[in-house]
Every structure is written in structure tokens, then in C-alpha cells.
Image (cartoon, grey):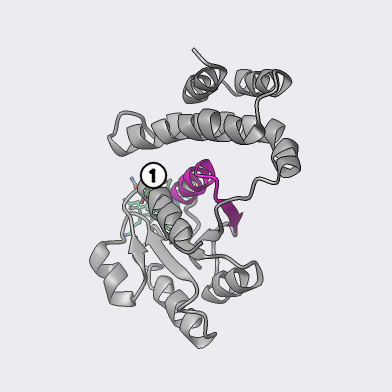
Amino acid sequence: MTIFEEIAQTLQKGRAKLVAELVTKALESGEQAKDILEKGLLAGMNVIGEKFQKNEVFVPEVLIAARAMDAGVKVLKPHLVAEGVEPIGRVCIGTVEGDLHDIGKNLVRMMLEGKGIEVIDLGVDVSAERFVQTAIDENCGIICCSALLTTTMGVMKEVVEKAIEKGVRDKIKIMVGGAPITQSFCDSIGADVYTSDAASAADAAEAILKAGK
Ligand code: B1M
């Protein structure tokens, strides 16, 4: 087994401390940080994403794997910066105004990070104004909105309207998701992409950002 495969498999088992040790070992043996990220950490997280979509693993396993990914990335980060590895793009994410549910939103964030996307996490109870202004100020390619309450999903329409009002609707994609959201709701408010789960959200965001490069 290569060191990359070892890292990927250890990440899937959620063994954070061992992942950090293996990343250190790989760096010491002269591997490039970019390869460790792509062939080890991201490869492992992709497997978790695929299994999550097929209901072969569940929320706890994803959270534990994401924690292991974080441990590896922490070791790797200074080396990635030194090698000049660029993230594939930047997005902002949050749970919409009036809504405090953040478990799904956090899963989406972790899957996005698992794709090498830079994520600005605005947390919960995020207003349309804050989503759009952050996307403008921080040069985000995508705004990702999560909602769990039928009473708060309307804020997503406000996000679309705010982006139009600020003249950036053609520059910034808007992705929506959360238990009460559907494709027809997404279409009705004029958002760009709806996905039903975190792994598909990360796949869609990756495709959008790569297409925009
Ligand atoms: Co609340 N809650 N809750 N709650 N809660 C629900 C959502 C509810 C369905 C329970 C019920 O009544 N059966 C109901 C909503 C009913 C409705 O709107 N029709 C409800 C309610 C009513 C409330 C309160 C109003 C209760 C009260 O106080 N009377 C209150 C509201 C607070 C507020 O937000 N202002 C409230 C509070 C809470 C807690 C704080 C106790 C807690 C939240 C803790 C937290 O998030 N930190 C909580 C919880 C845990 C739930 C349930 C039990 C679980 C939600 C969850 O985390 N699911 C939920 C009932 C249920 O679902 N069984 C319920 C797991 C999570 C992984 O799924 O977020 O759907 P989800 O994310 C999925 C996908 O939707 C998708 O990816 C994830 C998985 O891959 N996804 C995206 C999510 N965001 C995405 C974005 C994307 C793409 C995909 O693109 C950008």
C-alpha cells in the first residue's frame, strides 16, 4: 500500500491523530504537499462522500472523517502555501435568517472543503444582505444557503433578489438545500442549483467553480 492509500484509508476510519502522523511521515519522505492532499486526504474524503450518497455511511462517520481530514490539512497547510497550491475557488455558506439548524450546513461545508474549495462559513441566522455582501467582498463564486424550516426557506428568494439588486446575479451562483427544499422550489425562486445531500452539493460546486476558471 502506498502512503497515499494509507492516508486515505486512515481518514475513512476517522483516525485523526494517525492521519496527522502519516501526513508528517509523507512530507518527511519527500512527497509533495499537493499529492498528499489530492491522492491521500481528498481521495479518502471522496470515498466517504460516495458512501454517504449511497447510505453506506451516515452523519457520524462523515463528521469523524471530516475531523480526521482537518487534522491532516492542519499539518499540510504551511506546505501547501509554500508550494503555491491554489484552492479551486471560494464559496460562502450559511443557514438562512431565522433558522438555527446547522448540522446539515456543517456537513455541506466539510464536503466542500473535502473538494479543495475555500469556504467562508457565515454560521446560522444569516440575512440575505450578509450572504450577498460577503460574496461580493470576499469574491465568492457561489453562495450556499441551507434551510430546515418551512418558515425560513423564503429567505432564499431574498438572497436571489438581493443579488439582482446589487447587480451581481450573473457573477455569483446560488445553491440551495436542506430538508424542505425541492428542485421545484429552487426553480420557482430563480436559484441556480438544488441538491438533496451534502456530497452532491460538493460535486455541483466543484463543477461550477472549475467551469468558471
Ligand atoms: Co428542529 N425542526 N426545530 N431542531 N429539528 C426540524 C427541522 C423539524 C422537521 C422537526 C419536526 O417537527 N419534525 C421541524 C421543522 C418543521 C417545519 O419547518 N416544517 C423543526 C422545528 C419545528 C424546530 C423548532 C421551531 C422547534 C421549536 O423550538 N418549537 C426550533 C427552531 C429553531 C430555529 O431554527 N429557529 C428547532 C430547534 C432545533 C434544535 C436546536 C433543537 C436542533 C438543531 C441543532 C443544530 O442544528 N445545531 C433541531 C434538530 C436537530 C432537528 C431535527 C431533529 C434534525 C435536523 C438535522 O440536523 N438533520 C429535525 C427533524 C428531523 O429531520 N428528523 C428538526 C440532519 C441533517 C444532516 O440533515 O440538515 O436536512 P439536513 O441536511 C441534509 C440535507 O438536507 C442536505 O445535506 C444534508 C445531508 O447530506 N443539505 C444541503 C442541507 N443543507 C444543504 C445545502 C445545500 C445542499 C444540501 O446546498 C447549499
Q: Give the amino acid type for the residue marked by disc 1 in the picture.
A: Ala
Residue 17 lies in what quarter of the image?
A: top right
Q: Residue at x 68, y 18 (%)?
A: 25
Q: Nearer the viewer, residue 188 or 100?
A: 188
x and y percent of residue 165 in the render? Answer: 50, 87
Residue 113: say if magenta: yes
Does residue 185 appear anywhere in the picture? Answer: yes
Residue 60 lies in what quarter of the image?
A: top left
| Side (left or right) of 100 relative to 50 | right
| Side (left or right) of 134 relative to 154 | right
The overriding secondary structure of the stretch rendered in magenta is helix
Q: Is residue 185 above or below residue 48?
A: below
Query: Magenta residues, as a range?
Result: 104-121
Q: Nearer the viewer, residue 196 or 82?
A: 82
Query: Helix, strand or loop at disc 1?
Result: helix
Residue at mark 1: 199
Q: Residue at x 35, y 29 (%)?
A: 57
| Side (left or right) of 189 relative to 35 | left
x and y percent of residue 90 in the render? Answer: 57, 58
x and y percent of residue 198 in the render? Answer: 40, 47
Does residue 71 appear anywhere in the picture? Answer: no
Q: Residue at x 56, y 17 (%)?
A: 3
Instruction: Say whether mark 1 is within 8 Å of ligand 1.
Output: yes
Q: Residue at x 58, y 53 (%)?
A: 119
Q: Nearer the viewer, residue 131 or 174?
A: 174
Q: Is residue 84 above or below residue 208?
A: above
